[in-house]
Each structure stands twice: as C-alpha cells, then as structure tokens.
Amino acid sequence: MRQLLLVLCSILTLSSLDTSAMTIAGTTPDLSEMRLVQKLNCNNPQTQAAINECTKLSYQNADKKLNQVYQQLVSTLEKSRKQKLIAAQVAWVKFRDTNCEFERSKYEGGSIVPTIYFGCLENTTKLRTQQLQEYLKP
C-alpha cells in the first residue's frame, strides 16, 4: 500500500510538469560546454591555459612585492625626492607596460600570448623591485 502511494504521488508529480521541463530534465549535458574547475598546480601546469594562469599569478605576486618596497621607500623620502620618485614610477609603469605589449605582439593570436606578456611584466617588475631596494640601503 505504501509503495502504491509513492508511485501514485510520483505519477501525479510528473503529470503536473509541463513537457519542456521533462525534456530539459531528461537531456544529457554537453560536456564540451562544461568547464571543469580544478585546483591549479603551478608547480607542474599541464595545459597552456594553466601555464598562462600561473604566469599571471606569479606576476601578481611580483607586483605586490614591488608595491611593498615602493611604499616603504616613499615613506623614507623628503617631499621633493618623493615627488621625483612618483614621477619616475609613473614613467616606469608606462615603459614596462608598453615594452611588454611590444614583446607579446610577436606572438599575437597564439595561445602563448598571456604567458609572454605576464612573464615580461614579472621579469621587468622584479628588476624594478631590486632597483628600489637599492635605494633603501643606507
């Protein structure tokens, strides 16, 4: 009796659904359109997309370090030198970005473009961080 009630309830529920809802519920998802999310392993990236993302993350870490050193240096300078450093940094950022745009243009249209671009940004940023750290030395 109990099973009969469950079957009847199921039939009533299904019959109350419109046809489009049953069709959607019965379709198999297109796996080619699904994006699987997995943990990024930057110690051993396996795809170009992973390499691109890891290079971007590496650049972002280098940029954070640069900003920390820059803020530390700015806080030690008197007003006139601080203004000169700010102007130099603005010019340097423009140079870095423009130079890296040029470097990546050689590979335009390729899947490696983000790796080239973020790699350039990272390397150039690390060099600038070293320069700024030198100014902090007594």
Image: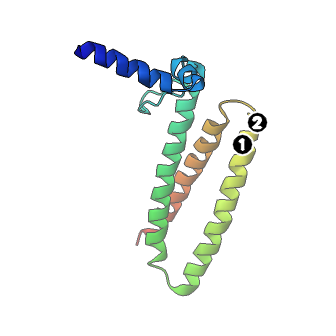
Image coords of residue 71 (percent x, y): 47, 70
The residue type indicated by label 1 comes to Glu
Tally of numbered tags: 2
Disc number at residue 103? 1
Q: Which residue matches tag 2?
A: 106
Q: Could you say which quadrant of the image residue 69 lies in? A: bottom left
The residue type indicated by label 2 comes to Lys
Q: Is residue 7 visible?
A: yes
Judged from the image, the secondary structure of the residue bearing numbered disc 1 is helix
Q: Is residue 134 visible?
A: no
Do the CB atoms of the residues marked 1 and 2 lie less than 8 Å apart? Answer: yes
What residue is shown at x 76% (from left), y 40% (from top)? 105
Left-right relation of 54 to 107: left
Above or below — where is 19 with respect to 95?
A: above
Check the picture and name the quadrant holding the N terminus: top left
What residue is shown at x 55% (from left), y 47% (from top)? 122
Image coords of residue 130 (percent x, y): 49, 57
Q: Could you say which quadrant of the image residue 75 lies in? A: bottom left
What residue is shown at x 51% (from left), y 50% (from top)? 60
Left-right relation of 72 to 24: left
Give me the C-alpha separation between circle 1 and circle 2: 6 Å
Check the picture and name the quadrant holding the C terminus: bottom left
- Report the residue that reaches farthest toward the left: 2
Q: Could you say which quadrant of the image residue 85 lies in? A: bottom right
Judged from the image, the secondary structure of the residue bearing numbered disc 2 is loop
Camera-side residue of 56 and 131: 56
Above or below — where is 62 with respect to 87?
A: above
- Report the residue that reaches farthest toward the front: 1
Camera-side residue of 110 and 20: 20
Q: Dot 2 surroundings within 10 Å: few (below 14), some, or many (20 or more)? A: few
